[in-house]
Image (spheres, rainbow, N blue to C red):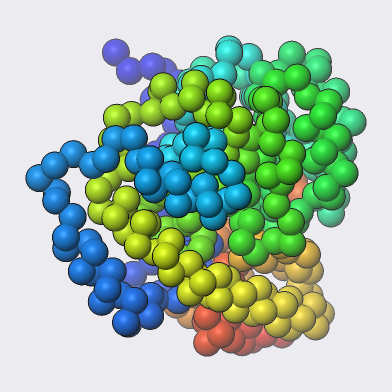
Amino acid sequence: MIRSDIKALAAYHVPDSSGMIKLDAMENPFPMPEELRKQWSDTVAAVDINRYPDADMGALRGKIAVHAGVSADQILLGNGSDEIIQMILLTVCAGTCVVPAPTFVMYDLISHWLKRPVASVPLSAGFHLDADQFLQVCAREKAEVAFLACPNNPTGNLWPEATIRKIAEGFNGLLVIDEAYGPFSERTHTNLIANNVMVLRTFSKLGWAGLRLGYLIGEAEQIAHINKVRMPYNINALTQGSASFLLDHFDVFEQQAAEIRAERKRVMARLSAMATVEPFPSQANFVLLRVPEADSVFDQLKQRGILVKNMNSARGLLANCLRITIGAKAENDAVLQALGEILI
Ligand SMILES: Cc1ncc(COP(=O)(O)O)c(C=O)c1O
């Protein structure tokens, strides 16, 4: 009855973080300012939940389009960008999906759910991406789709613009440039959008992870096709109402992102000064670092009430690496102090 490859899978595991300093999932650490929270509650309370939500979401897409500098018919909304990755992989012709390694796991996972082969192109030490090698693998595999997370998760680095442009121009399939960490990086890629190039974004990292809202930007014709596999009413009414309200107060979240970027700089400087820690440059709201004995450091951080992400089990380039989300100042100080004590 159940496919054997699905039986062999483990369900996506989210560790229990109750009562802990939570620095494992790249969330924005700041609660919504109190005055804004009150106005937002009024907005949510006015939503008619006895009715299905707006199915087309023209007004919300319009607002997001203004924000992204494109037109509303170039925007597709998803229940998190994860759902959009699934829609893309459902829509594109059968054929290999090419991704760098390591990168965000959902490209590979969802491809496998949908029986799509995946080919990965290993990053070199320092997490560099070789555009020629990537294009060679795409050609060899006759790939139909490729994902590039810019900045990349879990490494945090942003590949040079020339690398992304070369792949965008040299690949015949659909290239998805995933800008989940765009709010924390120095560059976006909407200038590369073409018939076969799309940009994927999410509001999760900017402070609305609980709403589950992501969007895809592409040429209108391609967006219209992918929209055909979107579940009716995929964005619930509370999320629609909330997002529409919060987009009118976007400066609050941009300010928070600026604070997170400033904290990242401070945390990087402190980590770089620790003799046994090797932090890697980051353009995201997290930092990847290599420590001696990552499993033990992870456990000791946990014992002190701090939850980070242990990447060590992936081995290879991620051996002995931890991924730490940039939190509020006090949270960052707590993790820095704990690392200092653990690694003396
Ligand atoms: C590169 C990348 N893309 C997409 C996502 C998924 O984000 P969302 O919360 O919008 O599903 C993540 C989440 O960690 C990510 O790291």
Q: Nearer the viewer, residue 278 or 77?
A: 77
**Left or right of 48: which side holds 304?**
right
Q: Nearer the viewer, residue 230 or 285?
A: 230
Q: How many marks?
A: 0
Task: Identify the image quadrant of the C terminus.
Answer: bottom right
Q: Is residue 276 above or below residue 7?
A: below
Q: Is residue 39 above or below residue 102?
A: below
Quarter of the figure with residue 51: top left
**Left or right of 208: which side holds 206?**
right
Residue at point 85%, 41% (across, down): 163
Quarter of the figure with residue 11: top left
Residue at point 51%, 72% (across, down): 251
Task: Identify the image quadrant of the N terminus.
Answer: top left
Q: Position of residue 341 (x, y in %)?
A: 64, 86
Residue 112 visible in image: no
Q: Is residue 146 above or below residue 333?
A: above
Quarter of the figure with residue 168: top right
**Left or right of 165: which side holds 216?**
left
Q: Position of residue 300 (x, y in %)?
A: 54, 74
**Left or right of 214: which side holds 46?**
left
Residue at point 44%, 27% (across, down): 227
Q: Position of residue 265 (x, y in %)?
A: 72, 77
Residue 30 visible in image: yes
Residue at point 50%, 34% (across, down): 73
Q: Nearer the viewer, residue 300 or 110?
A: 110
Q: Position of residue 224 (x, y in %)?
A: 48, 25
**Quick one: which residue is furthest to the left in this view?**
50
Q: Nearer the viewer, residue 107 or 204?
A: 204
